[in-house]
Amino acid sequence: MKRKDFIKNSIYGSAGIGLAINNLSCKSDLSKKITILHTNDVHSHIEPFSSDHSEFPNKGGFERRSTLINDIRKHNPDTLLFDAGDIFQGTPYFNFYGGEIEFKLMSMLKYDAATIGNHDFDNGIGGLNSQLPNASFDLISSNYDFTNTILETKTKEYKIYNKSGIKIGVFGLGIELEGLVSKDLYKETKYLSPVEITDDITSKLKNEENCDLIICLSHLGYKYDNAPNKICDLTLAKQTKDIDLIIGGHTHTFMNQPKVVKNKTDKDVLINQVGCFGLFLGKVDFFFDQKNNKRFNSNVLMI
């Protein structure tokens, strides 16, 4: 689908109404609502697009995103906000400030966590490390082994959030850096198998931590038509179990609704990704009944 048609058919602005996908029934016992908001591949787009932009005039920007997020939080305090990587690189803001502005603004918007994209190494692993004091949110990275690097102990393998008694486990996966990023930028960082790491972490989150909802922040990419054997979100969902939602990035994929995929135990996994450059905000609402059975409802919001 062309981006213009996508916008016309499936997005609402800050004052509009969204087109939703859902498996939400009208039962009255859905007593708890958890809202998951997400971005990806913002690429240092701090300000809105110019008024004369051919596709997105005056759209995007942190200020507009903040207004939208704050309004959603007013309606539901049980809201979490995540980013799926490639926060850096793409405008002079990064060239001049090295990520300081991005992390400070994300902190002001009260992001809960982000995972690491390949472009977040563009100033080297030392450059990423130097910006961590500007981030009040966690960097969650499960399949990058930072042993013997400056980032050792400075990221989380996973994190658990508790909202109104609902436990939400979150972990993060990064793309293989070899061949994509110069080794002198990521140093001794080791890439670990996303499928093996996912099996280990989801088992822990599900069976030991008793999480009700498991979310993967993924910078693996949605799919690769020209490289069918390359790990991607679709493959990850099919080859693993216990993930409820994959929040994707890297491929700049515009999805007007989440893709529902069957995992290896024939249960549903949602995959969502909302384009790039901070133009869109993904929103997935999970509703839990008294036994913590869940349903979902999803919107894509234009900023």
Image: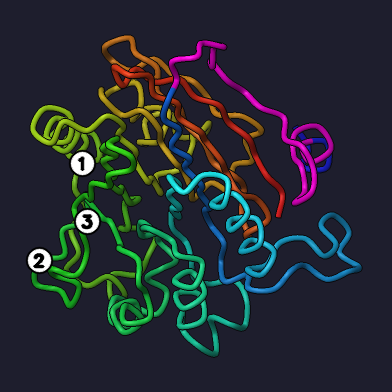
Quadrant showing the C terminus: bottom right
Residue type at mark 3? Tyr
Q: Mark 2 points at which residue?
A: 147
Quadrant showing the N terminus: top right
Q: Position of residue 79 (x, y in %)?
A: 45, 47
Would you place residue 207 above or below residue 189 in this image? above
Q: Residue at x 22, y 36 (%)?
A: 198
Compute the Cα span from label 3 to label 1: 9 Å
Q: Which residue is drawn at 17% across and 78% down?
A: 150
How many circles with numbers are drawn on the protein? Answer: 3
Asked whether, in this view, residue 266 is left or right of residue 13, the answer is: left
Q: Is residue 24 magenta?
A: yes
Instruction: Give the image quarter of residue 122.
Output: bottom left
Compute the Cα span from label 1 to label 2: 16 Å
Q: Where is residue 43 in the image (x, y as percent from the top left)?
A: 56, 66
Q: Mark 3 points at which residue?
A: 144
Q: Residues within 10 Å of mark 2 (few under 14, many from 20)?
A: few
Would you place residue 7 above or below residue 149 in this image? above
Q: Are marks 1 and 2 in contact (CB under 8 Å)?
A: no
**Magenta part of the protein: which range?**
6-30
Front-lying residue, 10 or 112: 112
Residue type at mark 1? Ser
Mark 1 secondary-structure assignment: loop
Residue type at mark 2? Thr
Asked whether, in this view, residue 205 is left or right of residue 47, the answer is: left
Would you place residue 92 above or below residue 224 in this image? below
- Give whichever of discs 3 and 1 has the lower sequence position: 3
Q: Which mark is residue 193?
A: 1
Asked whether, in this view, residue 173 is left or right of residue 99, the answer is: left
Q: Which residue is drawn at 43% across and 37% down?
A: 34
Q: Residue at x 29, y 35 (%)?
A: 166
Compute the Cα span from label 3 to label 2: 9 Å
